[in-house]
Image (cartoon, rainbow, N blue to C red):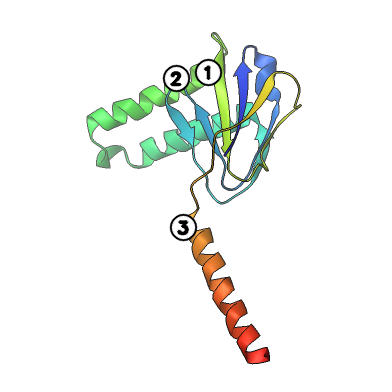
Amino acid sequence: MFIKKLHIKKREDLWRICHKAPCAVLEIPELEFEIGANAKRKIDSVYNHIAGAVYNLSMHLSMLREQIDVEQRDRIAETVERLNALLDVDTPWTLLLHDRTGLSQLLPDDESVETGYGGPAEEDPEETSEREEEAKLAAVLEAEGA
């Protein structure tokens, strides 16, 4: 698992480009918050990745307001507030980009972006299943051609 770390210290840091691979996860450890993998590649500024999460949570809250209990509603609203506060960069915070493929990037990739290796990643069950099916098909095709 490759992990890229960026310390957001000033508003200019929010305008760095974040290329999030389909299986990558963005994490903000200060909030214990993640923007999960969604099988789609997304290339946007750090600001827009966070603003997108704010929008999605806000829409979720407004659409399901009556179906969510009060405590959960308050926690979601608090998360939205805290994410919005991060966009003001009143205090420094950390962005972690977890990617098992190594395809994700934070640009410009200068000395303020730390890249580490967090050990082997868990296998994606769907990819494992696809790989097994391909191996079976290849074995059948090989047996027929032999």
The amino acid type, in three-letter code, at marker 2 is: Arg
- Dot in front, 1 or 3: 3
Give coordinates of residue 41: x percent, y percent.
63, 47
Crowding at label 2, few (<14), some or many (≥20) Cα neighbours within 10 Å?
A: some
Marks 1 and 2: in contact by CB < 8 Å? Answer: yes
**In the rendered structure, which disc, 2 or 3, sits on the residue that comes first in sequence?**
2
Q: CA distance from mark 1 to mark 3?
A: 34 Å
Residue, x 33% and y 42% (percent of image)? 64
Assess whether mark 3 and mark 1 are in contact (beta carbons under 8 angstroms): no
Label at residue 125: 3
Q: Nearer the viewer, residue 84 or 112?
A: 112
Mark 3: few/some/many CA within 10 Å (<14, 14-19, 20+) = few
* Pointer 1 residue: 86
Image mark count: 3
Marks 2 and 3, Cα distance to the nearest angstrom? 33 Å
Q: Is residue 77 above or below residue 101?
A: above
User: How dense is the environment of label 1, judged by Cα within 10 Å: few (below 14), some, or many (20 and up)?
Assistant: many
Quickly name the residue at label 2. 82
Residue 25 drawn at (x, y percent): 53, 38
Instruction: Judge by depth and name the residue closer to the eye, 110 or 60.
Output: 110
Quadrant location of the N terminus in the rendered image: top right
Give the amino acid at mark 3. Pro
Q: Name the residue located 51 percent from the left edge and 30 percent from the top edge.
A: 27
Which element is circle 2 on?
A: helix
Query: In the rendered view, does 75 fall on the left or right side of 142?
Result: left
Q: Quadrant of residue 24?
A: top right
